[in-house]
Amino acid sequence: MICALGSAVCFGTASVLQAVAARSTAPGTGSGVDPALLLRAVRQWRYLAGLALDGVGFLLQIVALRSLPIYTVGAALAASLAVTAVVAARLLRVRLSGAEWGAVGVVCAGLAMLGLASGGEGDKGGSTGLRFAMLGVALAVLLLGAVAGRLPDRARAVVLGLGAGCGFGVVEVAVRLVDDVSPRALVANPAVYALLLGGGAAFLLLTSALQRGSVTAATAGMVIGETIGPAVVGVVWLGDRTREGLGWLALLGFAVAVTGALALARFGEAPEPSP
């Protein structure tokens, strides 16, 4: 749980740095899958610093996913929006309303409930079909980003955010599907390719969503995409469970944490600092 929360801190802080860099980058082609936009963004130190924090956060996420159910880690990652809100308030002097501070508290309460109710990670290894399904979802995320580039700005932001969330969700599930790290096994495991493709596609779509369109809509879509689907996969196909008799508390904590994160969706991109 400490690793899951540490991952949220890294991702939440990184999003402030990356969003500022993305907004100051020249517009791209308008496509949701625009590698040139990402290349321009990485020329800025803020984006590079954000990527470094993302790397640390990803390592902590892997450790957490090897010990906790996916629904707990997913909710913790959604809680990175609470971190983003606090960081934006401190570093960029953005004012949080009383309701937004309340939402930060709600997220923390939801995570506390999840921490009390979560059991260990599921004991099911996942089938070959599930591994190929994750690879298919990762490819679909790329296709979704290409199609989203033709949509109006608000719809574009929602679709790109949802696609980015699904890409991050693929990463969460794929980590659990990599059980043998020998070179031969890694090359033969479709989940490895799903992890790489899903993570890369999610970064492309998220960068494009932050650069143009409604930040709130994009981030809300991302939170939904990276929490609900992976949680269902973990429970149904990977055997994730709660502590005996505390299933209701886990469900309540998950709902509370995700709802609080959605209330903070505008902080998916750092707001402009007050003059």
Image (cartoon, helix red, strand yellow):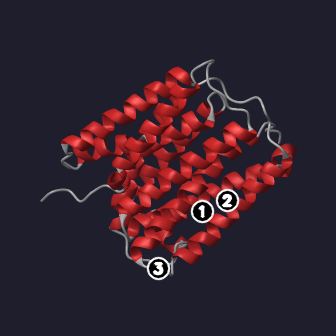
Point out the image quarter for the C terminus. Answer: bottom left
Q: Position of residue 64 (x, y in %)?
A: 59, 31
When asked about the image quadrant of residue 67, the answer is top right
Residue 127 versus residue 11: which sits nearer the camera?
A: 127
Q: Looking at this rendering, what residue extends furthest in the top direction?
A: 244
Residue 103 x, y percent position in the rendering: 31, 40
Seen in the image, is 130 located left or right of residue 90? right
Residue drawn 50% across the image and 36% down it: 254
Task: Report the amino acid beneath label 2.
Answer: Leu
Which numbered disc, 3 or 2, marks the residue that appears first in the sequence? 3
1 and 2 marks in contact (CB < 8 Å)? yes
- The amino acid type, in three-letter code, at marker 3 is Gly
Find disc 2 in the rendering and name its residue: 197
Of pointers 3 and 1, the one earlier in the residue sequence:
3
Give the structural element (helix, strand or loop) at label 1: helix
Please tell me whether residue 86 is drawn above or below residue 217 in the rendered image: above
Residue linked to disc 3: 30
Q: Name the residue: 61% across, 49% down.
A: 229
Please name whichever residue, 195 or 40, is drawn nearer the observer in this view of the structure. 195
**Residue picked out by circle 1:** 201
Badge 3 element? loop
Work out whether residue 224 or residue 270 is closer to the camera in this orientation and state it: 224
Q: Can residue 230 be seen from the camera position used here?
A: yes
In space, the residues marked 3 and 1 are separated at their CA atoms by 16 Å
Indicate left or right for 127 with 113 as reference: right
Residue 184 percent across, percent down from the top left: 87, 45
